[in-house]
Amino acid sequence: MIYSILWADDEIDLLTPYIIFLENKGYQVSTVNSGADALELVIKQKFDVLFLDENMPGMSGLEVLIAIKQIRPNLPVIMITKSEEEELMEDAIGSKIADYLIKPLNPNQLLLSVKRIFDKKRLQEEKTNLSYQQEFRALSMQYQDKLNAEEWSEIYKKLSYWELEIDNTENKSMAEVLNSQKSEANAHFSKFVEKNYENWLQKPDSDTPILSHLMMRKYTFPLINDKSPLFFILVDNLRYDQWKILEVFIQDYFQVERENTYYSILPTTTAFARNSIFAGMMPSEIHKNFPDKWVHDLGDSDDDEGYNQYEEFYLQQQLKRLKIDAKSSYHKIIHQYQGKQLVDNFNKLLTNDLNVIVYNFVDMLSHARTDMAMIKELAPDESAYRSLTASWFQHSPLFDLLKKISAKKGRVIITTDHGMIRVQNPIKIVGDRNTNTNLRYKQGKNLNWDASNKMMVVRKPETIFLPKPNVSTAYVFAKEDGMFAYPNNYNHYVNHYRNTFQHGGISLEECIIPVVYLTGK
């Protein structure tokens, strides 16, 4: 492909050596010696880039720039000037120029500027693919070793990094390779969790990760002080890769002081993991200490929020138990208007030591994608799903709230209760009418299933601190990208739920949770 350049400069004859240099590099260069002529030619012809002198008789470079952006808003403009005035640079940058060059020009400087525009995507794609290929083998070798929980977190972060990098390339040629590597990593990780989970709870040691019930004690409560309020924001169902997408918008307002991870307890659901976070207890301990508050998941509801009605109560009890004397508030945002009300009442929050805010939108989006064909079409894959999350955040009251916190130089913790995984492979299971409806875990007293190595079976729930509604209650957790399906109407069930985002089981995406500490800039 031959790219065409229009060069507007009142001393164009003096620039002949540069023009010849660019033509020898394969570019087609047209020239004019005034801004008016540049405007006229841009209307008549298509150009790939415009070199625009800032100081020309008649229309100035900035005047031409504004006029051209109205006619061809997507035409890249490289401003060329003798002036190094800061105000001029700011005006040019504010008018969305592609680059800014100062005379005397260097031929290689011109070439580099052009390449940044024309070849940026190609060069970035080649570099990304090459770099990932170099790391592919190292990662594959690494997760086959005996790893601890922290090392698995680092592997998941690296895989997420490459997923986002490849996502930004045009043809995503390495995406299939990465997906295959993630699947292999998940197979090893699931075995790791199955082997160690009970010991983490029964015999914790230095390699035991921070789990849901200890997360606030470890990462939140030590940051409470009487000098400035701490905002604890839990965005339900926010995966690590989604956090990295949101970070792009947040970084203009906050400094990331610490980015940690913790592990969600099993099952990786709102009903279990989030209650555990706020209570600072494992589910069986919550059930024992607050029997009138715990609601058993017995298959009578698909609404996770029905099991999370006492989070504020649990939080207050945990603060009291740990003897933390802090003035706190709790807000759960399910609807847009609730988020706007919270922003409107922001100043009241500044009087508290700790403000806990739960945002349910991402989880609701996940469920909507499962049930609504339109949402499924809008987000057919993980890349599109991340884009949908980013679009929501940009226009959300949560972003407005964060901006207000930043303006007050406030402090924020952003985290979640669990992640999610796109499910693919069905596992046949049979249960009675009281078996819960979750696709990634089942609890019941009469469970039967096909022999499968893609599930973890727990016949004694008390060993991992889970409630037992019945003496014979067992729990099973889907590993990797599996999903439970009933033999009745099997094909319809599988076709409906395959390729949807679910949580409750064991995978890198569900278990390894970001917890990020931010301070306002």
Image (cartoon, rainbow, N blue to C red):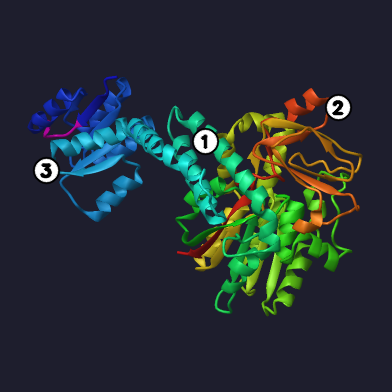
Q: Which segment did they paint magenta?
A: 8-12
The answer to whether the residue labelled 2 contacts the one labelled 3, judged by CB atoms less than 8 Å apart, is no
Q: CA distance from mark 1 to mark 2?
A: 34 Å
Q: Secondary structure at mark 3?
A: loop
Instruction: Work out whether mark 1 precedes mark 2 in sequence or the reverse, and give the earlier one.
Output: 1
Tell me what residue is drawn at x 70 percent, y 44 percent. 505
- Sequence-first tag of 2 and 3: 3
In this picture, residue 428 sits left or right of residue 258 = right
Chain-order first, disc 1 or disc 3: 3
- The numbered mark at residue 104 is 3
- In reply to whether residue 61 is colored magenta, the answer given is no
- Amino acid type at circle 3 is Pro
The residue indicated by pointer 2 is 488
- The amino acid type, in three-letter code, at marker 1 is Gln
Residue contact at pointers 1 and 2, CB within 8 angstroms: no
Q: Is residue 9 above or below residue 495?
A: below
Question: Where is residue 195 shown, x and y percent of the image?
Answer: 66, 50
The nearer-to-camera label among 1 and 3 is 1
User: In the rendered image, which residue does mark 1 sit on?
Assistant: 181
- Measured from the top left, where is residue 342 in percent x and y? 67, 61
